Amino acid sequence: MIEVSRLSKCFGSLQVLNSLSFRVAQGEFVTIFGPSGCGKTTLLRILATLEQPDRGTIEVNGVDGFARHEEYKGKISLVWQDPRLLPWRTALQNVTFALEMRYPEVSKEEAGRRAREAIKFVGLLDFADHLPRQLSGGMRQRINLARALVLDADIMLMDEPLASLNEITEKRQLMNEIAHLWEVKRKTVVYVTHSVSEAVYLSDRILVFSDKPTALLEEVRVPLSRPRNLTSRTAEEIGNHISELFGGMIA
């Protein structure tokens, strides 16, 4: 579904991405994994066409991300690290806002119906009329998921959605929500993290990146059934192998 070919990006004299090439199959959950500052978010921004690469191409089912920008953009939704909810709008209104921006032709009634379905899916229908300040960090991030989900795009790009959460229980709950979302909806997911445990728990395949200038070090397949047990021998072996690629510097 996604094909990235010879992608390179520099900021001034700093080369961030160095001729990256990879593919993501339809319905696959692929994690982009690497140390902080290696260019993971830059890659995601290029996949979302928010940044232009210096060289290389991105395509979704043959649709060029830059030559046919609007058609390509309609196939993608985004979940950022910071939920960026509008503080004066309720949870429901924040989700309908995504539809208003992407599909202004959708009626107010239809937008409300679809938004309620998305909020129900993430388990927060009882909080639909709450303002963001009335929600916990994990709940705000689940509304962020609902906002991406309501667009019903083929591909979901996720940029470290657990990183802004402090509570271990909230991180675990949201990680399970993301796994459930993928199991039910079977969207194609490209997920950015620098957490080994997140990558092993969620992914079909992990693309391990080097530090800058970023290159693809290794593709690691995760041959584990779901739901996953991170204390299993296979999960620990995969996690240890990835950590060893960086001299144990990543946890």
Image (tube, rainbow, N blue to C red):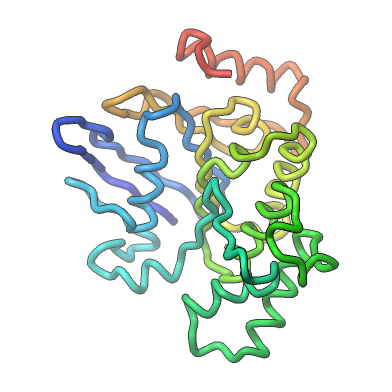
Q: Picture coordinates of residue 77 (x, y %)?
A: 50, 62
Which residue is farthest right? 126
Q: Nearer the viewer, residue 176 or 166?
A: 166
Query: Which residue is painted at 49% across and 81% down in the image?
Result: 103
Residue 24 vs 89, above or below: the answer is above
Residue 73 vs 108, above or below: the answer is above
Q: Picture coordinates of residue 64 (x, y %)?
A: 29, 63
Query: Which residue is painted at 70% across and 41% down in the image?
Result: 175
Total numbered circles: 0
Query: Which residue is painted at 27% across and 35% down in the image?
Result: 17
Query: Which residue is painted at 50% across and 47% down in the image?
Result: 190
Which residue is farthest top? 247
- The quadrant of the picture occupied by the C terminus is top right
> Position of 56 compared to 26: left or right?
left
Residue 197 vs 138, above or below: the answer is above
Which residue is farthest left? 13
> Position of 42 compared to 107: left or right?
left
Q: Nearer the viewer, residue 143 or 55?
A: 143
Q: Picture coordinates of residue 19 (x, y %)?
A: 24, 36
Q: Nearer the viewer, residue 124 or 93?
A: 93
Q: Picture coordinates of residue 239 (x, y %)?
A: 61, 19
- The quadrant of the picture occupied by the N terminus is bottom left
